[in-house]
Image (cartoon, coloured by chain):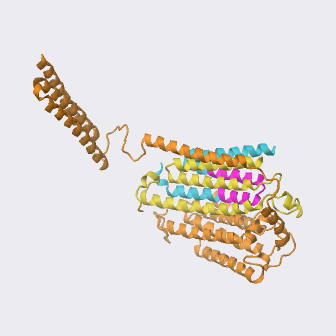
Amino acid sequence: MIELVGGVLILLGAAFHFSAGLGMLRMPDVYTRMQAATKASTLGNTLVLAGIAFFHPGWSLKLIVIVYFVFMTNPVSSHALARAAHAIRNSMGRTPVVDALSDAPQDRQWVMWRILVAIVVASFGLIFATVAISHVEQQSLRPLAESYVRLVPEALRAPNVVTGILLTYRAFDTLGEVAVLFMVAAGVGLVLTSSERGNDDDPGPGRRAVMQSSEVVRTGAQVLGPLTAIFAAYIIMNGHLSAGGGFQGGAVIASGIVLMLLASPAYQLDLEFLSVAESAAGVLFVVSGIAGLLFAGGFLDNRILPLGDFGAFFSAGAIPLLSVLLGVKVGCELSVILDRFRP
Amino acid sequence: MASNVVLATGLALILVGISGSLLRRDILRIVISFSLIGTGSHIMIVSIGYVKNGTAPIVDRTLSVADAPVRAVDPIPAALVVTAIVIGMAVTAVMLAYAIRLYDSKKTLSIDDFTESKW
Amino acid sequence: MNGLLLYLLCFSILVSGILAVSLRNLLAAVASAGLASLFAAVCYIFLGAPDVAMTEASIGSGLSVLIFLYAVRRTSAARE
C-alpha cells in the first residue's frame, strides 16, 4: 500500500520532469525556457524524492536534506542566469508581458517617489500659505521706496522712476546683469559649437538641407523688420520718459533679428559685427560709469550730461545714453544666444 | 486684496513648477518646469510691491511730482524683476544648451538613462 | 469689474501652468508656458508695473518660447 503511494508520487514527479523538458523545447525565448526548466524540475525532483522516501523510510533524513539543497540551488541559479541573460540583452519573445528589469522605474518605486514628491510639495505649500495669508497690502510706500520716488524726478530729472533706479541708483546691478548675459552667450557658444551642428562655411546640399521659408514669412519679415527696428529704437529712447528702457528695447531688437533669421533660414548672422557692437557698448557703459566717477557724484552717476528740462527728450543726464548702450548690448547678446540654437 | 490674490497665484505657480520638475523624466519638460518656477517667483515679487489703489511710478500728466510719493506703487521690486526676467531667460538658454548636448551624446532625453558621471 | 478680471487672469495663469506641466504633446506644453507668461504680463499692468509687463511679454512669451522650439527641433529625432 505504501509502495503504491510512493510509486504514484514518483510517477507524478516524472510527469513534471517531462513537462519541464517539453517546455525547454517549445518556449519562445530564454526567460520562459528557464522558467519552465526550473519550476517544473524542482517540483519534479521533490516529488520523486518523496516517493523514494516511501520505499526506504530509513533514508528520510538524507532525502529531506537533498530536497532542501534542491530548493536552495535550483531557483537561485536560474534567477542568476536570467539576470545575466537580461544583462547581455537577450531579446524577449514576441509578446512580453512585463519587463521587470527594464530601465523604467518599477511600479512600486514610482509610487513611493510620488508620495515623497507629494509630501515635499505639501510642505512647501504650507509655508507658502502662511506667507500668502500673512501678507498685508501696503497702504503707503515704505521709506526707501518713497525716497526713490521722490528723488528720481527731483535729482535725476527722469520721469520714469524704475528706469532711474535701474540706470543710476542701482546701475551696478545692471552692469552685473550685462556681464551675466555675456557669460551666458560665451557659455552657450562653447557648449553648442562642439555639437553636431558644425559651423561649415559652405553647407553642402545633403547635410544642411534647410527648407526655404514660405513667401508669406519672407514678405512679412521684409515689412516688419524695419518696423521692429523703429519700434525698438522708440522703446529704448523713451525709457526715461515713459514705460520702456534698455532691456525691453533689447528684447525687441533680438526679436527683430530672429524674425529675419526665420525668414531666410540660410542666412548667417554676422557674428563678428555683433560681437564688436556688444563689446563697444559694454566698454562705453563702463567708460561712462568712470566718467561719472571723475566728473560727477560717483560711479555711473548720470549727471555727466546736462540734466535738461523735465520730460524733454534729451534730459535726465546720461540716462538716455545708458539706455541706448544697454539696449544695444542686450539685443546683441540675445540674438547671439538665439543664433547658436538654430538647427 | 488684489495683491493677495496675485501673490497666491505666484506661489501656486511655484508649487506647480516644483512638482513638475520632480515628477517628469524628460529633460525638456524639467526645463519648462524651472521656467514656470521663475515666472511664479517674478509674479510673487511684483505683487509684494503693490500699494493699495496705487498707480505706476511714472511721473506724467496723471501723476504729478508732488503726488508721486503718495500714490505710486513700489518701484524697487519692479526694477529687480526686470533684471531677473532677462537673467532667467539666459539661464533657461544654458539649460537647454546642455540638454541638446546631452541628447547629442546619448540620443535620449530621459534623465533615467544618464546614470554615469562621465560625459 | 476690475477685481473680476484680475481673478480671471490669475485663474488662467494657474491653468496654463498646470497644463504646461501635464500635457503630453511637448509643443503644446511649451506654448502653455508662454501663455502663462503672457497672462502674467497683463497681471503686471494691473499691479502698476508697465516696465515689467513689457519685459515679460517680450522675453517670457516671445524669446523664451522661441528658444524652447529650437531646442525641441534639435532633439526631435528621439520622438515620434
Residue at the top extreme?
A1
Residue lying at 28% horizontally and 46% vertically, measured from the top left:
A85
Q: Is residue A234 visible?
A: no
Give the number of callouts.
Answer: 0
- Identify the residue at the far bottom of this view: A294
Picture layout, residue A122 above or below residue A230: above
Where is A220 relative to A15, above or below? below
Between A255 and A221, the one lying in front of the other is A255
> In the image, residue C73 lies at what x, y percent?
53, 56
Q: Residue at x 38, y 45 (%)?
A: A102
Colour chain A appears in: orange
Where in the figure is residue A157, as x and y percent of width and height? 84, 71
Instruction: From the viewer's perspective, tell me whether residue C63 is left or right of residue C80.
Output: right
**Residue A246's image quarter?**
bottom right
Q: Is residue A172 above or below residue C40?
A: below
Quadrant in the picture for residue A32? top left
> Would you say the magenta stretch is mainly helix, strand or loop?
helix
Q: Examine the image and state in which quarter residue A319 appears.
A: bottom right
Q: Does the magenta stretch include residue C43?
A: yes
Q: Is residue A90 magenta?
A: no
Give the left or right position of residue A32, taking residue A274 as reference: left
Q: Give the percent coordinates (x, y) of residue C53.
A: 73, 57
Chain identifier, yellow in the render: B
The foreground one among A259 and B51 is: B51
Q: Can residue B13 be seen in this view?
A: yes
- Residue, x 61% and y 52% (percent of image)? B36
Chain letter for the cyan part: C
Q: From the image, which quarter does the N terminus of chain A lie in?
A: top left
What residue span does the magenta drawing correspond to? C33-60
- Vertical placement of residue A316 versus B89, above or below: below
